[in-house]
Amino acid sequence: MNTPDSLWRRRWRWRILWSYLGLLALSHFVQWARPPHGIVRLGQQVAQAPVIDDDERPTGESTPLYYLDTRPTAAADTHVLVLLNGSPMRSPALDGLVRELTPDFRLVVPDMPGFGASAGPELPNYSAETQAMQLLALLDQLHIPHANLAGYGFGGDIALEFAELAPTRVQSVTLIDSTGPVEYEWLGDPVLNHALYGAQIALITLAQELLPHFGIMDISTFNEAYAGSYWDTDQRRVRDLLQNYREPMLILHGDNDLLEPVAVAREANRLVPQSELALHHGGHGEIYQHPEDIADHLRDFVRRVQAGQAKTKATARPQRLEEARAQMTPRDQASGVYLLAILALIVLATLIAEDLTCIGAGLLVARGVLGFWMATIACFVGIYIGDLLLYLAGLYFGRPAMRYPPFRWWIKEADLQRMSESFGKRGMWLIFISRFVPASRVPLFIGAGILRFSFMRLAVGLLVAGAVWTPPFVGIAALLGQQMLYYVERYEKAAFAMLLLVVLGLAAVVHVVLPMCTWRGRRLWLSRWRRFTRWEFWPWWMIYPPVFVYVAWLALKHRSLTVFTCANPALPDGGFVEESKSHILRGLTGAGSAVATWTLLPEADDPNAAASRAQLLETWMAGRGLVWPVVLKPDVGERGQGVAVCRDHYSALDYLGRNTAAIIAQEYVPGVEYGVFYYRHPDEKTGHLLAITDKRFPSVTGDGKHNLEYLILKDDRAVCSARFFLARHAARLFEIPPVGEVIPLVELGTHARGALFLDGTADLGSPQLTAAMDAISQNFAGFNFGRYDVRCPSANDLRAGRNLRVIELNGVTSEATAIYDPHGSLLSAWRTLCRQWRICYEIGAANRARGAVPVPLRGLLQSFLHSRTTTKFEV
């Protein structure tokens, strides 16, 4: 029901939407006009780093790299220590360490490109290998021949890549709570981790593109550079980098690190036989919470390196060398907060990709990171929550979404009714089976919400199905382990194309193959084909582009885009959009009985006012001596929208209860309906008939054997508008009409709602009809151009210009609807439409010369946009 409150809410929804789109456009303009750049800190200097492409090759361009150098003029033999911050941290995170170590070393602390002060326009690559190449360029510009490197978190990866890139430039490497071999990172597999980082970069990218942040997110901590650093880095290299490293190494790690478990440090210590492992009490943030402890270890280590007392790979103990060559030690089973983090990650990941998450959970079981039941329960909980969320999305947002495209194109209320009956009988079985049928769950569970299937029954069905399906699936993944991911990794680059093909294939099966197996499905496909191949059924945006070009030429010729609005000075905007039917009908008052009797039922402020408005309707009918049926239609509407023929008090009461806007009540005029397009130049005494449309109302005849649905689909013309007719007559589709009974399929002369339009211009046009239309039109001062919808007893009456009853008049945007004759060509239609607009512009220009003022373009656009967002009427 379109209550005042619902209308108010809809208007505010549109205002909020347009405000959001406006802010988003302004945000993107600001980012384009003023590219993002980081905030430079006091004491930072700038160098130039090469831009590296996806293939790890310089592009020839450069990007700013800001850095802090505590002793830029120090002697050549001064010990240099390069501090590399992690991702998403910035160099200020190392300030405590800088204060502690400044007296002892020349410190170089860069903000790598994309981070901190070096944040700026997006770069093609943020991998650890790329950042090592950029760090090498910085040290070259600072004329630093060799240095000690200390990398925190992701900075450890950069330090290892630098040591691989320029081994002679590295005196030592210190890893502080650093990342390590991929088998010890998060899900323990490069493919699964890459998928995890892909989801992360997708979320951050969506936030940066869809939130109006005016460039703030581009330079924030969690930006595309942070996400890209993990996405672009090949974690599989870390193990080789550690094994290849030959200089002294110190590994500092917290014994309670939740982001990088201590097992990471122990495995790195094993792989580098000359390394020293020092575990400190605390977590991942110890470097800025207690920098003095980290500084003490680092200071002592670098001094021993400079004194030649630290071990290299060449001087490592034989036992350590033997341990480094051994196979990878099994990863400890996760526990504590790290276990909770992995379980939470599994639950969240199932909301994105159930099957892949279950495979990943099985792999963690195979590697000993998780217990079988722990992994299974996490998958089950995530799947169960996700399925319930799909149901709730359909329940709360499904039906409202169906009012708007594209959803209203796909799902109709009649379809829902049919589905609801089927779902009520087989719902539990469908829910159980869907757990074992890929691609069926999302539409099924959303559909269950839209159909308001019992929540308790659904919850129980999902519980049983999930309990049966999840343990075997996770168990198979645990048994097969890496083999299940081999194919995922092998076809990773083609994953999107394969997914698209699967979706298209399933859609083809559901929407093409299965329907083609039934007579009903084949007839509906014939309906689609005919509407596609016959231009009379095309949407306006496919027909009108050449006409728009011609109208643009007319606007140039007459030096005004909107001069056509002067064609009918008596109508607001010349009758462009949202013209009031009551205003037009009042203008025709002088035509007397030639206009069908009507009245205006005012807008209802109270949704419960339907009864009082129905009483007003019946009082008016009694005063005019009218009986049922009566026509009800919105005072402002187009293309037959909201028009209903009400045959009794109850249907009128129902209509008025669902539509609270101002309503025109009009006597029902029997007979044949025609569309007569009339125009008259201001300096002419008589007008002209541009086109006459002979409107036919399709019908089917009962045979006593088949139901109404069969008769509609069997009829050669009715099948073209089958979707509309089946929806309109949904309540009686399965009735079997007796032999000879004629069932009218439509009662309104609207092509979009199934009426057949024939070109009657040559056959029905006559001087008598022209004179009759002149007599009617000249009673409406200020009307010169538009289409009348009239009814009369017969074609002979129309030719003779007698017994005409006008039921509606449309202004400048009305069409010469005779163009929709099935035997007419699209080229002929374009000629008629172009002629129509040429006449409209000529009449408008003539009225402008007489003092009429064209509507400003801005006002016309506002009216058009308002017409697109106003409430749609229900029949």
Image: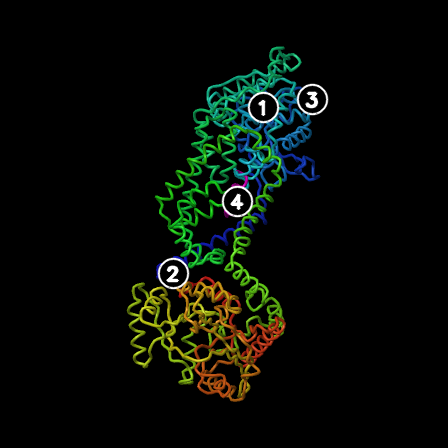
x, y (%) of residue 180? 56, 25
x, y (%) of residue 354? 49, 38
Q: How much space separates mark 1 and mark 3, taking CA atoms?
A: 16 Å
Question: Which three-letter amino acid code belongs to the residue tagged 1?
Answer: Ala
x, y (%) of residue 355? 51, 37
Residue hosting label 3: 168
Magenta segment, prevailing SS (helix, strand or loop): helix
Task: Classify residue 36 by image quadrant.
Answer: top right
Residue, far right: 60
User: Sequence-wise, which precedes: disc 4 or disc 1?
Assistant: 1
Residue hosting label 4: 206
Mark 2 burial class by Cα count in 10 Å: few <14, some 14-19, many 20+ = some
Mark 1 burial class by Cα count in 10 Å: few <14, some 14-19, many 20+ = many
**Circle nearer the viewer, 4 or 3:** 4
Question: Which three-letter amino acid code belongs to the residue tagged 3?
Answer: Thr
Which structural element holds mark 2? helix
Residue hosting label 1: 150
User: Sequence-wise, which precedes: disc 4 or disc 2?
Assistant: 2
